[in-house]
């Protein structure tokens, strides 16, 4: 009895140690980039390393956002992310609702849903060459709308599946009641289903914002100058073969993480569903 | 599972204008069409272009016509060393990183599920890495791996081990890439496993406890089978993502040193934009596309995920 109790205590202590180690490993790199963004160059290169900024400075933030066009990059990122999200969520909500609620002959519901999902499974590197050629032909390279269109291709299937999964969770009786009371089919969607799906709508929007804000490859190929380049592209541009601007990229990199950290806290309850395209309900 | 509503209004009263009634009658297709048209345009056109490009020889000079090349671009795949290196690197990376992420994520989820049920803040902190921009993650690890002043070599020094060039060392570059990816994506596995564990039924475990089944037997005969659908989805999504790795490798190693970390995505990018050979890039892309589709179809069938 005594032995098994002490074994249980040992086990518990080991478990907490494991969790603590995981937490340190998870958070240290984020702390490290933040900490370096507030150090002078000489302190970034210090050996042994300076564990926290002894002489904190905003020098690199000034360099990135005032002397270099990182403010413009951030603004481009924001405009592109918001536009992509708006288009994807509106179209995805309509389609998601149609797939969740209406009747279809045979296995069409399944087949349409699966086709929509399969478009998301295309590797971006496969889609991007034709899109590049098309935008080049249309004189749209290096414009924000081109990036928004490309991003929509990857966000729309996601938004559709997420909204479909949220609508499927709503009881259909409420819409039926509204229709018995004389509302139209579309009215029942607009005035009953949509308000009820608001948490799902918010979560889906935040996921789309995160995906677009983080995206790299498509923007790398479709943008050329600060007119349309996004934050990740701006950061990558300061890592050159000859010199890496550690302070500047730390500042810009940490800055790019801030909205994501806020969003992560907001959507944490929906995260599991978001990560699995609505397949696993958290 | 889902209850379908009739397409038209339940009410028999004729109501609203002609337009309203027309919208009402065609609501299903009206709601589906915008999304489907956008997706059709953004997938059919690229796929068609890729097929045509792959069987032609596109000159970098846009004024020259395309020449039919038959299967030349595909036979080139058989002899192209660079392609084989890219394929091997992609597979090595995918298998190692996804396996490690799965095992670590499952282990961590079992720990948290058992000992700290209600700590949502802890969960949010642990899942942070996967939300961060991959570019920010890449520069963070570049900073950690930096051979002269990087924190990892400081750690090596304190442990009495020789310093390494990490991402700059041909032997360690792939490992460095895998470590950074494991750091970012273990939380994904962890979170999905945790959700799966939270939805396990209690009764079978009570029965097993009465029968005196060991913890290991319970894990093997109850937990794993119950978790199987979640595990399958998590693995599928991670494998698809790992197969297309680009951002991390582009910034951390650029595919080097000596092509040790060159992935297929990176190679396609180089062929299309550095060597301006769109036709060959299209052929490699189609290979990647078919391999991905074939694998995921097989996997979904195998795991019976479709139901």
Image (spheres, helix red, strand yellow):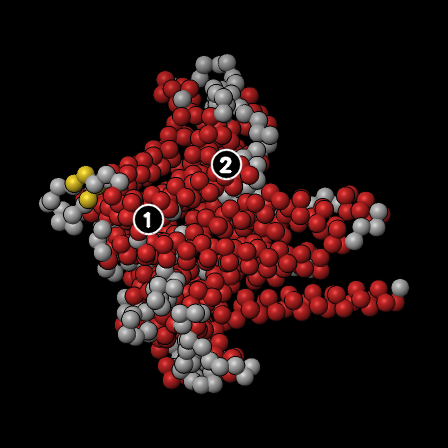
- Residue indicated by mark 1: B78
Alpha carbon distance from label 2 to label 1:
43 Å
Locate the C terminus of chain B and report the quarter of the image it occupies.
top right
The chain to which mark 2 is attached is A
Residue A129 visible? The answer is no
Q: Is residue B219 above or below residue A251?
A: above
Q: Is residue B291 above or below residue A110?
A: below
Which residue occupies the foreground of this view, A110 or A183? A110
| Nearer mark to the viewer, of 2 and 1 | 1
How many neighbours does mark 2 have within 10 angstroms: few (below 14), some (14-19), or many (20 or more)?
A: many
Q: Residue drawn at (43%, 72%), measured in percent from left and top?
A: B166
Residue B47 is situated, as x and y percent measured from the top left of the image, at 31, 38
Q: Is residue B10 above or below residue A204?
A: above
Residue A229 is situated, as x and y percent measured from the top left of the image, at 28, 58
How many numbered circles are shown? 2
Q: Is residue B145 above or below residue A226?
A: below
Residue A164 visible? The answer is yes
- Residue indicated by mark 2: A164
Asked which secondary structure carries label 2, the reply is helix
Q: As drawn, which residue projects farthest toward the left?
A: B63
Asked which secondary structure carries label 1, the reply is helix
Which residue occupies the foreground of this view, B275 or A216? B275
Left/right of residue B260 with respect to residue B154 in the rendered view: left
Residue A210 is situated, as x and y percent measured from the top left of the image, at 43, 53
Q: Residue drawn at (49%, 51%), measured in percent from left and top?
A: B238
Q: Which mark is residue B260?
A: none
């Amino acid at each position: 009895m005594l032995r098994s109790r002490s074994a249980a205590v040992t086990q518990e202590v080991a478990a907490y140690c494991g969790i603590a180690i995981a937490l340190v490993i998870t958070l240290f790199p984020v702390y490290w980039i933040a900490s370096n963004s507030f150090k002078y160059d000489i302190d970034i290169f210090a050996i042994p390393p300076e564990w926290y900024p002894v002489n904190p400075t905003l020098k690199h933030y000034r360099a990135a956002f005032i002397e270099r066009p990182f403010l413009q990059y951030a603004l481009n990122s924001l405009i592109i992310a918001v536009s992509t999200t708006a288009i994807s969520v509106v179209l995805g909500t309509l389609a998601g609702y149609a797939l969740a609620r209406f009747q279809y002959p045979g296995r069409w519901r399944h087949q349409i849903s699966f086709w929509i999902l399969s478009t998301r499974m295309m590797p971006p590197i496969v889609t991007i060459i034709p899109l590049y050629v098309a935008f080049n032909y249309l004189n749209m390279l290096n414009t924000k709308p081109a990036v928004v269109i490309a991003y929509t291709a990857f966000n729309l299937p996601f938004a559709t599946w997420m909204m479909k999964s949220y609508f499927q969770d709503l009881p259909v009786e409420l819409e039926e009641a509204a229709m018995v009371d004389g509302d139209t089919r579309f009215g029942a969607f607009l005035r009953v289903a949509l308000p009820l799906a608001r948490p799902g709508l918010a979560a889906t929007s935040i996921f789309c914002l995160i995906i677009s804000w983080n995206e790299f490859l498509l923007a790398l190929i479709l943008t050329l100058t600060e007119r349309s380049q996004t934050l990740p592209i701006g950061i990558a541009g300061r890592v050159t073969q000859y010199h890496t601007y550690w302070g500047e990229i730390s500042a810009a990199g940490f800055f790019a993480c801030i909205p994501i950290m806020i969003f992560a806290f907001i959507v944490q309850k929906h995260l599991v569903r978001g990560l699995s395209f609505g397949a696993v309900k958290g | 599972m889902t209850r379908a509503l009739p397409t038209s209004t339940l009410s028999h009263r004729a109501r609203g204008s002609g337009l309203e009634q027309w919208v009402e009658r065609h609501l299903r297709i009206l709601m589906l069409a915008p999304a489907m048209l956008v997706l059709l345009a953004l997938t059919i056109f690229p796929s068609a272009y890729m097929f045509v490009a792959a069987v032609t020889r596109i000159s970098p000079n846009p004024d020259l016509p395309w020449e039919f090349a038959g299967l030349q671009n595909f036979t080139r795949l058989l002899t192209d060393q660079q392609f084989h290196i890219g394929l091997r690197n992609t597979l090595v990376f995918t298998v190692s990183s996804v396996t490690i992420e799965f095992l670590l994520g499952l282990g961590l989820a079992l720990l948290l599920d058992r000992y700290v049920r209600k700590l949502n803040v802890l969960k949010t902190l642990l899942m942070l890495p996967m939300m961060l921009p991959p570019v920010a993650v890449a520069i963070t690890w570049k900073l950690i791996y930096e051979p002269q002043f990087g924190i990892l070599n400081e750690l090596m020094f304190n442990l009495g081990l020789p310093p390494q060039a990490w991402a700059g060392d041909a032997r360690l570059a792939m490992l460095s890439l895998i470590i950074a990816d494991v750091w970012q994506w273990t939380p994904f596995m962890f979170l999905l496993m945790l959700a799966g564990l939270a939805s396990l039924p209690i009764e079978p475990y009570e029965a097993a406890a009465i029968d005196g089944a060991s913890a290991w037997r319970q894990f093997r005969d109850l937990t794993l089978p119950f978790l199987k659908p979640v595990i399958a989805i998590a693995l599928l999504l991670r494998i698809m993502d790992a197969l297309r790795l680009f951002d991390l490798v582009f910034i951390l190693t650029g595919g080097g040193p000596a092509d040790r970390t060159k992935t297929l995505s990176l190679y396609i990018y180089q062929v299309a934009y550095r060597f301006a050979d769109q036709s060959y890039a299209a052929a490699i892309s189609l290979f990647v596309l078919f391999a991905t589709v074939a694998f995921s179809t097989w996997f979904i069938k195998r795991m019976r995920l479709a139901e």
